[in-house]
Image (cartoon, rainbow, N blue to C red):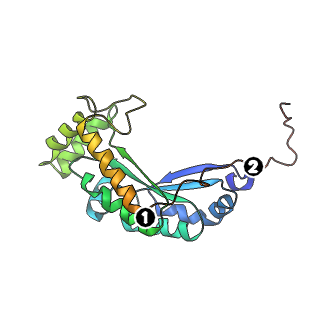
Amino acid sequence: MLAEFRNPVAIITKNHLVTRDLDMLQELAAHRAVSVTLSITSLDPELARRLEPRASLPARRLAAIATLRDAGVPVSVNVAPVIPGLNDHEILAIVKAAAEAGACGAGYTLVRLPYAVKEIFAGWLEAHYPQKKEGVLSRIRSFRGGKMNDAEWETRMTGTGVYAENISNLFRVAVERAHFPKREGRMLSADHFRREPDSRQLDLF
């Protein structure tokens, strides 16, 4: 439906299956009406398998970036979530690998643990990395104002404090080293949106 009407869309996914719709994504890309982001949490297949057992492994996500790039579909990487003590040391490597695969930009998100998610995550740490559990949770509190989550719009994705600032600086360095292309001309456009031929909807003016 999006391709038929050339409706602009931004897609974010952890799965190589996004390439299944390559023909429709190319149709949208031809009208600057699509962008795709692959989230990569870790390049370590074992950590990735434990964190996201139902998502594509890192190599498959990088392969999806390359496939989309080769097809002319704008694609970027999201290093998310960044978890202190588990994958924060991988930021430079993830951005570098994504850029080499063909990504045209990058973003990141610090881990968020709202509501019941904090208990689920604490249980997951206890099951998989018990020796790291308290250190990871303590570091999360350090950039969430002493809590496990911060719902403030301005800071909920990037956190506050010394650790959050260090991550921001590390990510900036990673992007600088990646030499991504400038963003001009990469914004989504509704210029080619088309209505259904027999639509009864009238113009406002």
Element type at marker 1? helix
Label 2 Cα crowd, 10 Å radius (few <14 / some 14-19 / many 20+): some
Q: Single out the residue that lies furthest toward the left.
A: 131
Q: Determine which quarter of the picture holds residue 202.
A: top right
Q: Is residue 31 shown left or right of residue 60?
A: right
| Front in this rendered view, residue 55 or 9 | 9
9 up-or-down from 148: above or below: below
What label sits on residue 193 in the rendered view?
2
Quarter of the image where one finds residue 52? bottom left
Q: Disc 2 or 1, which lies upstream in sequence?
A: 1
Can you give x and y, in whole percent of width and height, for residue 112 in the image? 34, 38
Task: Answer whether residue 54 is visible to the viewer in this image.
Answer: no
Left of 19 or right of it: where is 176? left
Q: Is 34 drawn above or below residue 101 in the view shown?
A: above
Which residue position holds label 1?
A: 99
Disc 2 marks a residue whose amino acid type is Phe
In the displayed structure, does residue 177 sit left or right of residue 102?
Answer: left
Q: At 19% across and 43% down in the image, what residue appears?
A: 136
Residue 22 in percent (x, y) is at 60, 65
